[in-house]
Image (cartoon, rainbow, N blue to C red):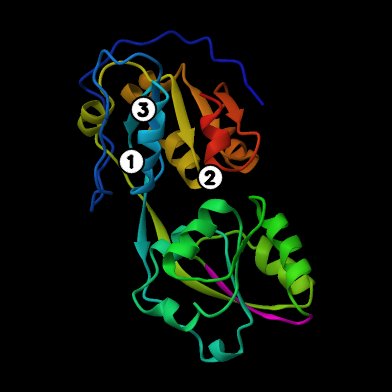
Amino acid sequence: MTLPPTGSSRMPRSSAVKPVRPCAPRPGRAFSTAGPDMAGRRVLVTRPQPGADKTARQIAARGHEPVVLPLTRTVTLDADLPREAASFDVVAVTSANAIRHVRTGLLDGLLHLPCLTVGQATAEAAREAGFQTVTSADGDVHALIGLAGERLKDRSTIAYLCGRERRPDLEQGMRAEGHAIMPIETYDIKKVSYSTQEIRTLVGIKPIDDVMVYSARSARALIAMMDNQEFLQDVENARFLCISTRVANALHARPGLRIEVAAEPHEAALLALL
């Protein structure tokens, strides 16, 4: 899906722009990995670290210039296994963050269980964490619910490793199938803000050609940042490349953006739009 660009012209920069208030701590490194003479498109990467640097390397390998500006950061929550942990039949995971940012020791009581994941990236994280039996769905929650229907016995009890902020689809779907599902919140996502000077330092003076958007939260953060006139000038003619329709829908709150959606909800399909 693609929206036509706005017809606005680029405005002159002004040093009197009201800055965006910064928040701490910073989300690791935020930088452009290529020099000013690099061929290709300038691509803004908005996902949190450490994934942002991994994506930047893939963009650079394609001959483009990645510009890393994480709009969110992932924090580990002090989660514990519930008393009912001994009754768990299976583990379900919808985000690699739920495993990568888990509190030390929490997985020890789960690694012996089969693990069902939403997609291949999450499956890879599960295997790296020590799960021995990992089965991946095709990239979305509905596929994961279908996979559970094929693999689980009736009235199974599911340990759901997840973030504090999440959609209810998996929990509702599993309960509708007669399973008990117990969320274990291992991480949270926090917004990262930048001052006008920080934006200028990190983004540079050349406009952005493409903005990669991975979550509805990042989409909302982008819209808020466009109130900063200097940042708006950086991205006003860019394509906004969204990993899913849900993310694209969040961007529609600001009319006139050029929005494109990946054919499938994973990063390989998103990179294919470049």
Q: CA distance from mark 1 to mark 3?
A: 10 Å
**Which circle, 2 or 3, is nearer the viewer?**
3
Residue 261: x %, y % from top left: 61, 32
> What amino acid type should be assigned to the residue bearing mark 2?
Ala
Q: Is residue 188 above or below residue 42?
A: below
Q: Secondary structure at mark 2?
A: helix
The quarter in which the N terminus is drawn is top right
Image position of 239 with respect to 139: above or below: above
Q: Residues within 10 Å of mark 2 (few under 14, many from 20)?
A: some
Q: Earlier in the sequence, mark 2 or mark 1?
A: 1
- Which residue corresponds to mark 2? 216
- Left or right for 265, reference 34: right
Let me know if residue 114 is in the magenta part. Answer: no
Residue 200 in the image, given as x and y percentages of width and height? 24, 26
Which residue, given by chain and number where applicable, does mark 3 sit on? 60
**Label 1 neighbour load within 10 Å: few <14, some 14-19, many 20+:** many
The residue type indicated by label 3 comes to Ala
110, above or below 134, in the image: below
Residue 257: image quadrant is top right
**Regarding mark 1 in the picture, which secondary structure is present there?**
helix
Please tell me which residue is depicted at 60% across the width and 27% down the height of the picture.
260
Q: What residue did someone put label 1 on?
A: 53
Q: Which mark is residue 175?
A: none
Pointers 2 and 1 in contact (C-beta within 8 Å): no
Q: Point out the stretch of residues depicted in magenta.
A: 154-161
User: Could you tell me how far apart the alpha carbons at marks 2 and 3 are, in whole angstroms?
Assistant: 25 Å
Indicate which label's residue lies in the foreground, 1 or 3: 3
Foreground pick, 131 / 54: 131
1 or 3: tag closer to the N-terminus: 1
User: At x 61% / y 43%, what residue is drawn?
Assistant: 265
Residue appearing at x 64%, y 63% in the figure: 168
